[in-house]
Image (tube, rainbow, N blue to C red):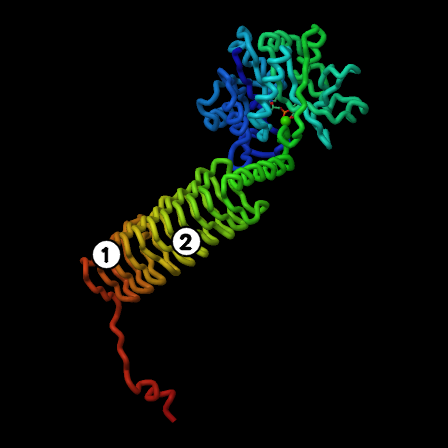
Amino acid sequence: MNRYAVILAAGKGTRMKSKLYKVLHPVCGKAMVQHVIDAVSKLNVDSIYTVIGHGAEKVKSQVGDASHYVLQEEQLGTGHAVMQAQEQLSEKSGTTLVLCGDTPLLTADTLEALIKQHEDENAAVTLLTAHADDPTGYGRVIRNDDGTVAKVVEHKDASEDEKLVQEINTGTYCFDNQLLFQALSQVSNDNSQGEYYLPDVIEILKREEHKVAAYQTIDFDETMGVNDRLALSRAEIIMKERINRQHMLNGVTIIDPANTYIDATVKIGQDTTLLPGTILKGQTEIGEDCYIGPFSEISNCQVGNNTKIRQSVLTDSEVGNEVQIGPYAHIRPHSALQDQVKIGNFVEVKKATFGEGSKASHLSYIGDAEVGSNVNLGCGSITVNYDGKNKYLTKIEDNVFVGCNSNLVAPVTIGKGAYIAAGSTVTEDVPGDALTIARARQVNKENYVSKLSHNKE
Ligand code: UD1
Ligand code: CA
C-alpha cells in the first residue's frame, strides 16, 4: 500500500512568545520539526509533504530535501493546512499519516504501530490518543457508549463534562487518503476559534459510516505537543533522558545523567566517561576511553580516543588521541590538535594547529598559528597576531622551545629546533637551531642601592 505523510508546520506558535517560529525551536539541539521528519523518515513512506507558512523559508532550509513542501498562505486551522496538499495527494490511494511539527518526542515505533493497526483494521481513520494526567489545552477524545470514537472536541469548545475527559487527541492520525480529502472539503470553521479543525474530519467520517478507530499509546510523554516554553523544557528533559539512556546502554559512563546535556546529533564511543556538567553539542563526535568534564562544553568537535578534557570550552575543532585539555582551556574555532598534545590551564587556542606531542601547558594565547610537533610553548607564550587591522600567521616548526613569557610578533616563523629565551619579543624570523634572545641584557649595578641619596644618613 502507498504511504504518505503530511507534517503541519505553518503555524507561528504565538504561545511560544518568540521571534523563532515554533517548529524551529530546538529540543536537545535539533529543531522540533526535524525530530518529526527524522521519525517519519524511518517509516516506509513514499513521500513526505510539509505544510509551511510562517517562516516558510527557514523551515525549508532546516528540513531540506527530506520533504516536499506545500504553502499555507493564511493559517486558517489544521484542517485547512492539510487541504493545501490536496492537489498533490487527493487523487492517490493509500494511507496518509498526518502529524504536527510540534510533537518532537514521537518515536518511529509508535508511528509504525499506529499505521499497522490502521491498515490491519482497514479503517478510514485511526487516531493516536493518549491518557493525560492534565489534559488542559488538548482536544478531548469523546467516545460513544460502545467505546467507539465519536469525535474530538477542542479544549476551547468543550463542555464542562467533556473537559473532564482525560483521553486526548495527540494530533497524529492515519487516514485513508481519499476519504481524508473528501471529508476535509466538508469541514466548517463554525467554532470558538473560527478555524478549520482537522479533527472534525473524524465526526464527518463517522457520520458517513466509515470506520473510525483509535490507537491509545501508553506513553503520554511521547505525544506531548509543545506550544509554550514550559512544554519545551519538559520535552527537553524527556528527550535528554532518552538520549543519555541510549548512550549508557551503548557503553558510555554518565556519572550524573540529570546534569549531562547531549544533543541528539552527538556520537560517543565506548568506555568514555562523562562527568557532571558536560554539554556536548551539534555535530560532535567523541571517541572511546575519553574522560570529559566536569563542566565542559564541546560544540561541533571531533575528538579521538583516550583524550581528557576537563572544565573547558571547545568549538568547531578537531582533537586527536591521548590529548589533554584543561582545566580551564578555551579551544576556539578551526583549531586542530594532533595526538598527545597538551593544552593546560588558562590557555586559549584560536585557528591554530598543533602537531603531535606539542604542549602549551600554562597561561598562553596561541592564535592564527601553525605549531609543529614536539614544540614546547612555555608559560605565558603569546602569538601577537593582530595589529589592530589585520591578523597574521605565526609558524613554529618542529622541536622548537619557546621560553616563558615570550611574544611572537606575527607574521613570523620560528625554524626547526630553535630555542627562544624567556621574555623575548620576537619580531624577525628565527633560523632553525638558533638560540634567540630578544630582550635587553640584564645589568647589575653593585652596591648601588645604599648609595642612593635617600638612603644616606
Ligand atoms: C491540535 C489539535 C488538538 C490536539 C493537539 C495535540 C486541532 C484543531 N487541534 O491542537 O486536538 O490535542 O493538536 O498537540 O487540530 N498548523 C498549521 N496551520 C494552521 C494551524 C496549525 O500548519 O493553520 C500547525 C502548527 O504549526 C502546529 C500544528 O499544526 O505544528 C498544530 O497546531 P496547534 O495550533 O499547535 O494546535 P493545538 O492547539 O496544539
Ligand atoms: Ca500544538
Q: Are marks 1 and 2 in contact (CB under 8 Å)?
A: no
Q: Residues within 10 Å of mark 2 (few under 14, many from 20)?
A: many
Which type of secondary structure does the marked residue at label 1 adopt?
A: strand
Q: In this view, does 452 lie to the left or right of 207?
A: left
For residue 379, what is the image quadrant? bottom left
**Which residue does the numbered mark 1 point to in the structure image?**
414
Q: Write the residue at 40% across / 57% down.
A: 344
- Front position in the image: 397 or 430: 397
**Which residue does the numbered mark 2 point to in the structure image?**
325
Respond yes or no on whether mark 1 lies under 8 Å from ligand 1. Answer: no
The answer to whether residue 323 is above or below residue 216 is: below
The answer to whether residue 276 is above or below residue 448 is: above
Provide residue 7's location: percent of width, then percent of height.
Answer: 55, 21
In this rendering, the label closer to the viewer, 1 or 2: 2
**Residue 309 numbered tag:** none
Q: Write the residue at 70% across / 6% down.
A: 209
Quadrant containing ligand 2 reads top right
Give the residue type that dot 2 points to.
Ile
